[in-house]
Amino acid sequence: MEATPDPYGRIAYRGLIAWPERLQREAPLLRRALAAAPSPQLLDLGCGSGEHTRFLTTLGFAVTGVDTSPSQLEDARAADPGGRYLQASLTELGTVLEAGQGGALCVGNTLPHLCEEAEVYSFFSGLAGVLLPGAPFLLQLLNYDRILDRAERTFPLVLRPGEAEGENTVFLRLMTHHGGGRLTFTPTHLRYRPGSACPVEVVAAHDVPLRGWRRAELEGLLEKSGFRVEEVLGTMTGETWTLTSSDLVILARRA
């Protein structure tokens, strides 16, 4: 596979998710989690193409979107020319952001891109350093307690309308387990044209190293970094977390 410094530039993630429906589902939790923010200054960490950044802006927050992917930030700026977006790693927040932030969210399985405990600690402690006391931090990732215990290797297939008539976009996500929570994640974008000479075509695919972090590991690192864990949920719609939940959602607060 051809190497690229920005693998997320090869798959049009923005078109693979039904964003209006997703944001509508997540809105009650987002509003509740951020209601007590001590300042309207928010951080959307791993903002991608900026959908959560723009949504929170409509709620009256002043949001800074942060991501490492140039292509994702290009899409975000194109959709929101007046928005504030910053290309930076999660591990360098303490040096690139101003202190006094009122809250933060990191959703969409962004955290597992940090594969070492020292990186996660650097992320959490750097974030704590720029947040005001009492500021909320909403963290969401897949439930790796379930994924690792069951050795799951795929997620439900996503089928979306394609750009051309009669064409569909298929999003396939595969995982290879290497032990110790380490995974190779292979997102694949397929073009499906039923009845054509080549009905399925690979548009883009790449391998991404991930670390499947368990709930206990993240709670311990959050508390070590200056956060107080207040609530743990199993979805962004508020269900209680169990070992079989789809997601791990942690609402923490800067101590």
Image (cartoon, rainbow, N blue to C red):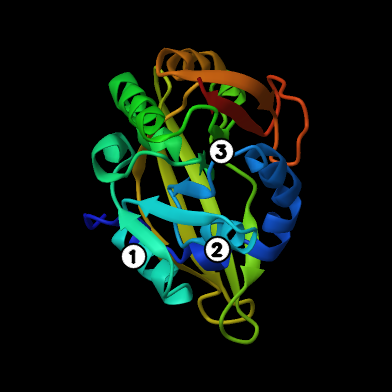
Could you classify mark 1 by the number of other residues whose Cα lies within 10 Å: few (under 14), some (14-19), or many (20 or more)? some
Q: Residue 43 appears at what percent x and percent y?
A: 46, 47
Residue in front for this viewpoint, 3 or 133 = 133
Q: Residue 239 appears at what percent x and percent y?
A: 78, 32
Residue in front for this viewpoint, 105 or 36 = 36
Residue type at mark 2: give it. Arg
Residue type at mark 3: give it. Pro
Give the residue number, with chain letter if any, for mark 2: 54
Between marks 3 and 2, how big is the CA–CA gap?
20 Å
Q: Nearer the viewer, mark 1 or mark 3?
A: 3
In this rendering, does residue 14 appear at all? Answer: yes
Give the residue number, with chain letter if any, for mark 1: 71
Give the residue number, with chain letter if any, for mark 3: 38
Q: Residue 201 appears at what percent x and percent y?
A: 47, 70
The residue under the point 50% across, 41% down is 102
Mark toward the start of the polypeptide (3 vs 2)? 3
Mark toward the start of the polypeptide (1 vs 3)? 3
**Disc number for residue 90:** none
Q: Is residue 245 left or right of residue 105?
A: right
Between marks 2 and 1, how big is the CA–CA gap?
17 Å
Check the image and report above or below for 55 versus 147: below
Q: Nearer the viewer, mark 2 or mark 1?
A: 2
Could you classify mark 2 by the number of other residues whose Cα lies within 10 Å: few (under 14), some (14-19), or many (20 or more)? many
